[in-house]
Amino acid sequence: MAVIERQPAEPYWVERIPAPVWAVGFLLLIMPAVANDFVLFQVFGWTFILGMIALSLMFLAGYGGMVSLIQMSVAALAGYMVAIFGPSGVEALSLFLPWYVYIPVAVVIATIGGALVGALAVRTEGIYTIMITLAIASAFFYFTRQNYGIFNGYTGFNLVVPPQLFGVDWRQPVPFYYLTLGMAALSWLVVVYVSRSPFGLALQGVRDNPRRMAALGFNVTAHRIAAYAFASVIAAFGGILLVWQNAQISPGTAGIPAVIDILVIAVVGGLKRPIGPFIGALIYVLLRSFAPDALSAFGLSTERFKLLIGLGFLLIVFFSPDGVLGLWERWRARRASKADPLRGGSR
Amino acid sequence: MKKYFLGAVAAAALFAPQAMAQDTIKLGILVALEGAFAAGGADGVRNVELAISQAGGMAGGKKIEFVVAPSDTTPDTAVRQARKLIEQDGVDIIIGPLSGSEGIALRDYAKTIPEKTVINGVSGALETTWVDPAPNFFRFNPDGAQWGYGLGSYVVNEKGWKRVATVAADYSFGYTNFLGFAVDFCKAGGDIVERFWVPLGSSDFGGVIAALPDDVDAIYLGVGGTDAINFLNQYEQAGTETNLIGGTIMADQTVLTSKGRAKDALIGTPTSGWLAEDNDSPEWTSYVKAYQDAFPESERFPSPSLFGVGYYIATTAAIAALNEIGGDLSGGQAKLHAALSSLEHKTPLGVISLNENRQATGTIMINEVVEDGQGGLRNALVGKAEGVTQTLGMSAEDFRAMGLPSRDTPDCAALRG
């Protein structure tokens, strides 16, 4: 009964992409055909933006073991730079440079800012990293609120809109949806790629055992700072999209509640995989947008909508310390471990 | 299978286009229900309910529905919620927002929805209707500068306080309300010795209280809500005793009904604003009675707050204009816009009309905080400034030349001239 064992051919790269990714990707691409403007612009646009900013935190926390609360401030810094170097309603302060100048400048400045904070924070561990980044984030908030010469204080900048590239108004719901979807997908792919690159693997080594990595000749500090710089680039693009979506930026954009929200999003979604922050962001946005409606549907006072948001997050974290992704993985593991009654073994 | 079915139902509910029945009019109430003004915002919602129930739930022959969109006083959230009201809930008219920076953000947003209408709730930034106003944004309340007007000449002439230091909130309403006070005060011969600006929502005023100069006749306080209560607590603890002058939101119901004794520092403090609780006009007394009858005592203020009155007047303006045009919202609500612009709105505070910027001209009340004899505090009416315009009685050119409200505008010496 000799059967010739044929060596299975190396699957074509397209075939290696699992089916759920195809399904989700297809759904997201045809979304404008079924969803209304609010869902496109507000729900999904905001989800992708918050997801990108939370993704930068997930990269640092998940692969680098550094929980940084500075990511929202880095995003806001990029947003502010767009408002300052580009066009805005505050004509006295904005420089009205063209887009091919202000976008790179904003990303570079935000990246330098994020890397500088990283350089300060990497010398600490665990709770101290959280505290030092939180301190810098609140300092940034109060600085923007009280600085009138550059950041225009409490009022901030209004009428910050994306450039009219290729004859498209990028703030219309459908173009903006595809813009944010494209940027989010790109960030996700880059994070997936970097996590498997030598740098990403070394970073995960640093996370697991910094002393051994140092003994092997890796520069631990440099890897960590580079991780901050890389995460800042993603956060910066998220911040630019955020300022375009709101058409304005003010200190409240990077206030302490917003900073904490990013951590909540990343934790609720799950810190183990790059898709987690996007799931967390979708849950956050849905709760933020529809909690008052859900309350009034049950005849309750809409004043207490924050209670519902808090309960939602509490339930997720209570039942799954590693976020929604953890729930999903546990469910799969349980299914897989159920023995097949006919063939025996698993599955 | 069941899971997919549930998913499909959920998706259908999420994406279903909003049914726009022709025989209803949908109002979106954009109101702060988080942050320093949450208590006032809740009173705004109560007053919207009151106004709608007084109209029998109908306007222009159509049924009124309303949706509440909570904000947290940041312009980001205000615009997000406004967009939700328009795009997701399909409202015809937005009533709101509550605070100054939100108002400016909504002015810009209103320009993107020319076929809808925004009636300001109670936000008071001058810029909202002064700088590049939106044609579909209407404000039936006087702005923050108007609310401050009349107080300055009162304290100079009646109290003889000519040298003051000021502590005010470091944001647009703080500047605007202060400007109204300062214009009048400086013209009457007063002098502002030092200006302190404190961030909105701050809880520690120790540094400012310690730095207040001793050789002044009075201190002007332009903070509100929980900030005002925090300030008064720390002011009491510091044992300082100077005369106080209050900005418009300093001695509002939200502060006067707060727990604790710190608010007693306010006794004898003159303030100016839109309201006088002991106003004895029949319109006002019947409105207060309706308010008190509509809600149980534990769920309301003793009498409507400034925020509540603002939302009440905005909602009644919408209803009055809709009645005038028979609820006809066709043609991009053009008829509604015209009716609102020319409305002679009969309110509990007298008749209010709008100027060419769709901004109200109104009467400002000067009040003084007194004890009500039952252990509480109330405002007693001591004077009025009638017909205060958006330009505070100056010509539009002079007003524009003075500059927009900011930390350093107005220049007191130039006004004293």
Image (spheres, coloured by chain):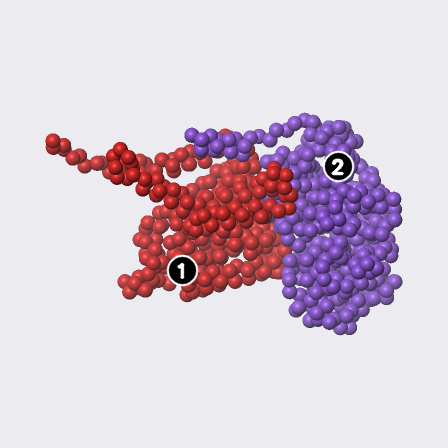
Disc 1 to disc 2, how far (Cα)?
A: 61 Å
Q: Are marks 1 and 2 in contact (CB under 8 Å)?
A: no
Please give the name of the residue rendered at 34% of the width and 43% of the height, measured from the top-left corner.
A333
**Residue located beneath label 2 in the image:** B53
> Residue B99, percent across and down?
68, 50
Q: Nearer the viewer, mark 1 or mark 2?
A: 2
Binning the other alpha carbons within 10 Å of mark 1 as few (below 14), some (14 to 19) or many (20 upward) gives many
Mark 1 highlights which residue?
A225
Q: Secondary structure at mark 1?
A: helix
- In x, y percent, where is residue B337? 74, 35
- The extreme top residue here reads B22
* Residue B18 vs residue A297, the one in the foreground: A297
**Can residue A165 be seen at all in this image of the molecule?**
no
What's the residue type where badge 1 is placed?
Answer: Ile
The image quadrant where one finds the C terminus of chain A is top left
Q: In the image, is A23 to the left or to the right of B312?
A: left
User: Which quarter of the rendered picture does the N terminus of chain A lie within?
Assistant: top left
Q: Is residue B261 above or below residue A346?
A: below
Asked whether, in this view, residue A221 is left or right of residue A46, the answer is left
Chain appearing in purple on the rendered image: B
Rendered image: mark on residue B169: none
The quarter of the displayed image where residue B344 is located: top right
Residue A324 vs A23, above or below: the answer is below
Under tag 2, what secondary structure? helix
What subunit carries mark 2?
B
Chain that appears red = A
